[in-house]
Image (cartoon, rainbow, N blue to C red):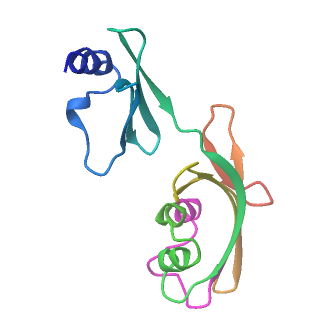
């Protein structure tokens, strides 16, 4: 108990430990029955570390999760919707959203999609080092075949760090 309030006070600027969320990991480390470290998973991207510096002082810091990034390819054939096809192929709705954003000005995904349309993608994903979760970082290249028409999108980083997608002819 003597160390509980100083621990909470040290952590307060980084994260309020009075607001622990159900389902998030909270780990404790002890040396000779003395609490020396508290590790709290704030969310999938950040972890709070509160460490005993000496007999009465605690230090808190937030550590960013270091995701492993890899490049992947994905192909899919539409049976009912783009969303369902991406979910069947990859299982992450974020990828379907990013793909639909690339072609938002060219394809009406509610009315123009046909059974048998297809897509091919090259994209980067970030994989959590400890969990079975991943995030779509960015789509690098995409091909969408809609009613026999091939539409391409190639990733381009603008000088102001915004992203656009262009067809092979630069349009």
Say above or below: 40 vs 89: above
Say above or below: 132 vs 25: below
Relative placement, left or right, of 95 versus 46 is right
Q: Where's residue 129, x and y in %?
A: 58, 48
Q: Is residue 163 magenta?
A: no
- Front residue of this view, candidates 67 and 27: 27
Residue sticking out furthest to the right: 169
What secondary structure prevails in the magenta region?
loop
Asked if one can make out residue 144 in the rendered structure from this viewpoint, the answer is: no
- Front residue of this view, candidates 29 and 82: 29
Q: Where's residue 36, x and y in %?
A: 39, 23
- Front residue of this view, candidates 138 and 50: 50
Q: Quadrant location of the C terminus? A: bottom right
Relative placement, left or right, of 100 versus 20 is right
Q: Is residue 106 magenta?
A: yes
Relative placement, left or right, of 11 versus 130 is left
Q: Could you tell me which residue is drawn at 25 percent across and 21 percent down?
A: 8
Say above or below: 110 vs 99: below
Relative placement, left or right, of 69 versus 14 is right
Which image quarter: residue 149?
bottom right
Which image quarter: residue 139?
bottom right
Q: Where's residue 54, x and y in %?
A: 40, 8
Q: Which residues are magenta?
A: 98-118
Q: Could you tell me which residue is drawn at 53 percent across and 82 percent down?
A: 113
Say above or below: 147 vs 82: below
């Amino acid at each position: 108990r003597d160390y509980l309030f100083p621990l909470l006070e040290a952590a307060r600027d980084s994260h309020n430990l009075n607001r622990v969320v159900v389902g998030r990991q909270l780990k404790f480390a002890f040396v000779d029955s003395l609490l020396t470290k508290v590790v709290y998973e704030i969310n999938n991207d950040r972890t709070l570390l509160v460490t005993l510096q000496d007999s009465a002082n605690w230090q808190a810091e937030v550590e960013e999760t270091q995701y492993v990034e890899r490049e992947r390819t994905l192909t899919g054939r539409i049976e009912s919707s783009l969303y369902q096809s991406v979910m069947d192929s990859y299982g992450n709705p974020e990828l379907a959203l990013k793909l639909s954003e690339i072609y938002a000005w060219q394809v009406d995904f509610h009315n123009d999609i046909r059974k048998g349309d297809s897509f091919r993608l090259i994209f980067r994903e970030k994989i959590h080092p400890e969990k079975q979760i991943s995030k779509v970082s960015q789509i690098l290249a995409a091909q969408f075949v809609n009613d026999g028409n091939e539409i391409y999108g190639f990733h381009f980083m603008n000088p102001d760090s915004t992203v656009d997608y262009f067809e092979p002819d630069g349009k």
